[in-house]
Amino acid sequence: MDLIVRVSRARSIFFDAANGGGGVTFADPVVEPNADQQPLGTQLLVAYRGATDATGIAISDASQLDAYGELRAPGSTAGTVQWLNNDTTWKNSLSAINGARFFQVRLSFISNAETLLTPTLSALGFAFTK
């Protein structure tokens, strides 16, 4: 049997964009290589979600997050998250979480099962103003 992984996902910790202050306004992210430079039939999708507060080691230790990017044990020593507008859903645009102090990133690598090609990521950058 040949097995092919078509979708592979990675999730980040919670980044503190405001460094102790209030919410921020996000600019478009830098993704290299960009969508037009990916192999034929593949995609790299970047999604975001924001929080107004995040505490505990979950903001610095990804082992405290499950496979879906959620806290393993909400309210425990892993920490807590106060979602922006009580919305836990992933957004396709970084500007959709404007006002969030913390943000989390999800990367979805969608491969081409026929050609066995996979997308790549060499750089990912975020810019914002406070």
Image (cartoon, grey):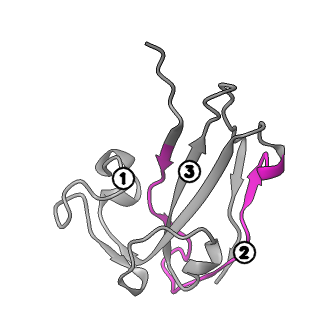
Instruction: Give the quadrant of residue 53.
Output: bottom left
Does the magenta portion include 29? yes
The amino acid beneath tag 2 is Ala
**Which residue was labeled with disc 3?**
107
Residue at horizontal 51 percent and vertical 25 percent from the top: 4
The answer to whether residue 112 is above or below residue 31 is above
Does the magenta portion include 94? no
Secondary element type, mark 1:
loop
First along the sequence among labels 3 and 2: 2
First along the sequence among labels 3 and 1: 1
Kindly check if marks 3 and 1 are in contact, taking CB atoms under 8 A apart as contact: no
Label at residue 27: 2
129 sits to left or right of 67: right
Residue 124: image x %, image y %?
69, 52
Q: Nearer the viewer, residue 105 or 13?
A: 105
Quarter of the figure that contains the C terminus: bottom right
84 sits to left or right of 121: left
Quarter of the figure that contains the N terminus: top left
- Gap in Å between the C-alphas at discs 3 and 2? 18 Å
Which span is picked out in magenta?
9-36
Residue 66: image x %, image y %?
30, 49
The answer to whether residue 81 is above or below residue 71 is below
Residue 95: image x %, image y %?
64, 78
**Which residue was labeled with disc 1?**
68
The amino acid beneath tag 3 is Leu
88 sits to left or right of 96: left
Residue at horizontal 53 percent and vertical 35 percent from the top: 6
First along the sequence among labels 1 and 2: 2
